[in-house]
Image (cartoon, coloured by chain):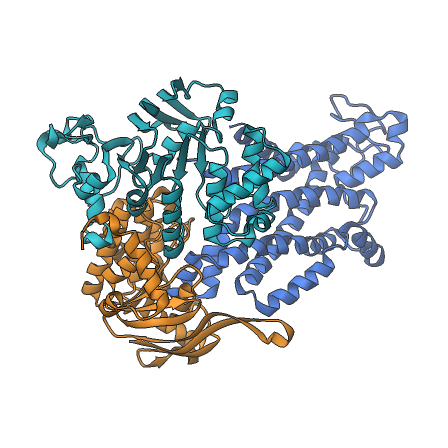
Amino acid sequence: MIELTSVSKYYSSGFLCRKRAYVVNDVSLAIRKGETLGLAGESGSGKSTLARMMIRLVEPSAGRIVFDGIDLLALKKPALRQLRPRMQIVFQDPDTSLDPRLTIGASVAEPLVVWQKAGRHERDDRVIELFGMVGLQPELADRRPFELSGGQKQRAALARAIALEPEFLVLDEPTAALDLSVQAQILSLVQVLQKRMNLTLLFISHDLQLIGRMSDSMAVLHEGRLVESGKTDAILRRPSDPYTIRLLEAARESEEWFGKDK
Amino acid sequence: MSLLAIADLSVQFESRSGTVPVLDHIDFAINTGERVALIGESGCGKTVFGMSVMRLLPSNARITGSALYAGRDILRASEREMQQIRGKKIAMISQNSAFALNPVLTVGDQIAESLTLHTSCRGEGLEREVIRLLTSLGIERPKENMQKYPHEFSGGMRERILIAMALACNPDLVIADEPTSGLDALVKAQTLRLLKSVMQDRTLLLITHDLGTASALASHTAVLYAGEIVEYGPTHELFRHPMHPYTQGLLASSPSAGFHPIPGMSPAPGQVPHGCRFCPRCSSAMDRCNSTHPSLKKSGNNRQVRCLRYD
Amino acid sequence: MTRNILLRVSVAILFLYFAVALLAPFIAPYGATAIVGAPLQPPDSEHLLGTNNVGQDIFSQLVYGSQVTLIFGFCSALLSVSISTCAGIVLGYYGGSVDEVVCRVLDVLMPIPIFPLLIVLTTFFNPGVVQVSIVMGVLGSIHGIRLIRAPALSLAETPFIEGAKSIGASDLRIMSRHILPNLMPIVTVKFVTASQHFLVMGVGLSFIGLWDTMTVDWGSMIQNAYSGGALSLGLWWWILPPGLAVVGISLALALAGYSLEESFNPRLEVNRI
C-alpha cells in the first residue's frame, strides 16, 4: 500500500548549509494493504515527522514514497490534492485537532463540503451517520470543541478523518492525552472501523503494550533512525536491538503490578 | 496514629452558573510511613484533593470538613501557619513540565530556597546541604551541577531536581501530583525506581491516573470516581482482586489486560446520578443501584468499597 | 462584569457619534458654512453653541464636521486593518523566503514615523482628505502586518490546519475559513485601536492645515478658533465643543478597545474547572 525508501528529513544550517540536523534519517519501510504498522519511539525520535511525510504534510528532504503505485513526491499540487481523500490523519492533542471556532458537526462536514459530496441534506445525514460510526450522540453536533471531553473530541477527529472513506489512516498517538478507559474505548473503535472500512493503519505510540495490541508489524525509531522492524509478535518476543530491549524492559517494569505471575 | 486524617471533606466551586461540587464527603487517612495513591481519571477531583490539602485552591472554592495534620486542622489554619507548613511539613513534587523550574535561577538556588525559608542553614552549611541532597538523588558532581540552569539538564535529571526540592526540608508528608505524566518510557521507569528508593521510609500521597505508577510506589490505593472514593485497600490486593466494578473496569481497559473498555463516560461534576454514581456504566448494576446511593463500607481486612453488591 | 459595562457604555457613545454623523442634515439647524448670525455670539436658544468669528453656527459645524472626522478615522483604519490582515495571514500561512524578505523590508519601514512623513508628503502634493486617508491606511498597516503575521504563523502549524490540508482543502479556504475566524479577536481589537489612532491623527493633520481648508471638520474648527484668538478672548463656546467631541470619541474607542481585548483574552476564558 505504501512504501518508503531511504526517506530523510533534515534542516540545514551553518556555512553554505553544510551542517545538517537530521530529524528522520534514511528510513525505509512498507505497509501492506489492510495491515497495521506500529511505529514506536520516544518524544523527539522523529516519529511524528515521519508520519506527516508519509501523507506529505511535511516535505521529505530525500527519499522516495510510493503510495498505491503512485510516486507521492513527484506529484504536483493539484494531483496531490486529488489524492488527499485517500489518506487521512488523526492527531495526538484533542485540544488542537479541531477548529475551535467551528461546531464539531461543521468540522466533520468540512471534508464533504470541500469535495462537494452530496447536497446539504444528504450531507447532514452523512454527518449523523459518521457520528454514529464513532459513537457520538448526534445532539453533540452543535457543540464547540471546548464543550466536549477529550475522548469526544478524538471521536470527532476520527469521524472527520474517515468522512472521505480513506484507505490509509495515520494515527499519531491518538490516545496519549486520554485516560486509560477512554483510550480503550477509542482504540477498540479504531479496530472496529479498520475491519469495517478495510483501513491500512499507521499507529504511532510510545507505548509498546499498545503497539503490541494494535499492530501486525512494527518499527522502532530512535533519534531519527529505524533501529528495528518486523512482525510485532517476533519483535516483542525477541527484540534484537539494544534500544528496543531497553524500551521493552521499561514497559515490563510498569506492567509488574498486574501480578500476572508470568 | 494518622499523620493526616481527612474527614468529610467536600469541595465546591462557585461559578456564574451556580455551585459545582467536585469532591463529596471524602474520609481518608494516611498513617506515618504509608504511601497512599489516589487514582482516578481526569475530572474525578484528584488534583483538587491535593490542592485542598496544600490549601492552594482558587478563591471561588468552598471547602467543608476537616483535615487534621498532627492534630491540627489545616483547613482552618491561617495563611501564615500554612506558609510554615508548606514546604517544611508537607511538600509537593510538582509535575515535570517546562514550567516546573524557574529558568533564570540555578538549580542549586532553587533547591536552597526552601531551606533558607524554613531552616537556619546559611552560607557553607546551606551549600553542604544542597550537595548532600543532590548526592542522595544520584546526581553526580553535585558541586558543578548545582551551578547549572534547568535547561542544561535532561528530563530525567530535572525530575531528580524537583524531588530534591520537595525533600529539602525533610518533610513529614510528600504529595506527588502526576510525577510521571509526560515522561517517556525509559525516563519514567528510571523515575519510578528513584522515587521508590527515596520514598522507602517516607509518607507519600501520590495523585495519579497511571496504574503502573500507583502500583510501583504505593502501599495503599484509593480509587476516586466522580468526586467520591469508591474503593480503598492495600495496593497489591486491590490490583489483584478489585472489588468495585469501576476498579475492575479500569484495570480491564489497560492494554495488557485485554483492552476491554468501560462503556460511557464519567459524569461531569454537578451532573452525577442520584443513586450509585457508577450505575449507568456498570455491567453488574441492580435495580436499586439506580436509586440508592451506596456508602463506603468496610469489607474484609482493611478493604473498603462503595458498592451495593457487597452490602 | 465591569468590563461588560465599560464595553456597553463605549459602544453606546460610539453609536451616538455615528447617529449624529449620519443624521447631520436633520440635526443641524443650519448649513456648515452658511453665515447665519452675528459673529461671536455666545450660546442662546437660536445658536445652541453660539457663533464663530464670521457668524457661522458652531453647533451645525460640529454636527457636519463629525462626518469628515469619523469617515477619515474609520476608513483609514479599515484600509490599514484589511491590508495588514490579508498580508499577515498570507505571510504567516505560506512562510518561506517571501515571508522572510517582506519581514526584513517591514523591519526597515517600521521605524519611519507616519506623522512627519505625512507632513512632508502633503506639503509637496497638496492632496485631499481621501488621498491622505489612503496614504495613512497603507503606512499604518506596516505595524499591523507584523501583529497579525505572528499568530497566523503559529495557527498555520496547529494540527487542525494540518487536518484541513490533509482533507485537500484549498489554501484560500484554509486561510478564509480556518485562520481568519480564529484571528478575528485580534483583528477586531486592532481595528478599534487603529480607528482611535487615525481619528486623532486626522484631527491633528487638519489642525495644522494639511488638507483642503474649506472642509469643515473638528480639526479645522479647532484651528479656526485657535487662530481667531478664542483662547485669549475667553470664547469657550468656540473652541471647547470640537475639542470635547474629539476627546469623547477617542476615549470611547480606547475603552472599547481595552474591554474587547480583555474579553477576548483566552486566559480569562479558560477559567473553568
Regarding residue C112, the answer to whether it shows in the image is: yes
Regarding residue C51, the answer to whether it shows in the image is: no
Quadrant of the frame with the N terminus of chain A: bottom left
Q: What residue is shown at x 45% (from left), y 19% (from top)?
A: B77
- Between B161 and A171, the residue placed more toward the observer is B161
Residue A39, percent across and down? 33, 66
Quadrant of the frame with the C terminus of chain A: bottom left
Q: Which tint was used for chain B?
A: cyan
Q: Is residue A260 left or right of residue B269?
A: left
- Between C13 and A175, the residue placed more toward the observer is A175
Q: What residue is shown at x 69% (from left), y 60% (from top)?
A: C106
Asked if residue B92 is positioned above or below residue C172 in the image, the reply reads above
Q: Is residue A12 left or right of residue A186?
A: right
Q: Which tint was used for chain C?
A: blue
Q: What residue is shown at x 50% (from left), y 39% (from top)?
A: B165
Residue C26, percent across and down? 64, 34
Q: Is residue C123 left or right of residue B273?
A: right
Q: What residue is shown at x 76% (from left), y 21% (from top)?
A: C44
Residue A210, percent across and down? 27, 58
Residue A83, percent across and down? 35, 73
- Between C197 and C155, the residue placed more toward the observer is C155
Quarter where residue A52 is shown: bottom left
- Between B278 and C54, the residue placed more toward the observer is B278
Q: Which tint was used for chain A?
A: orange
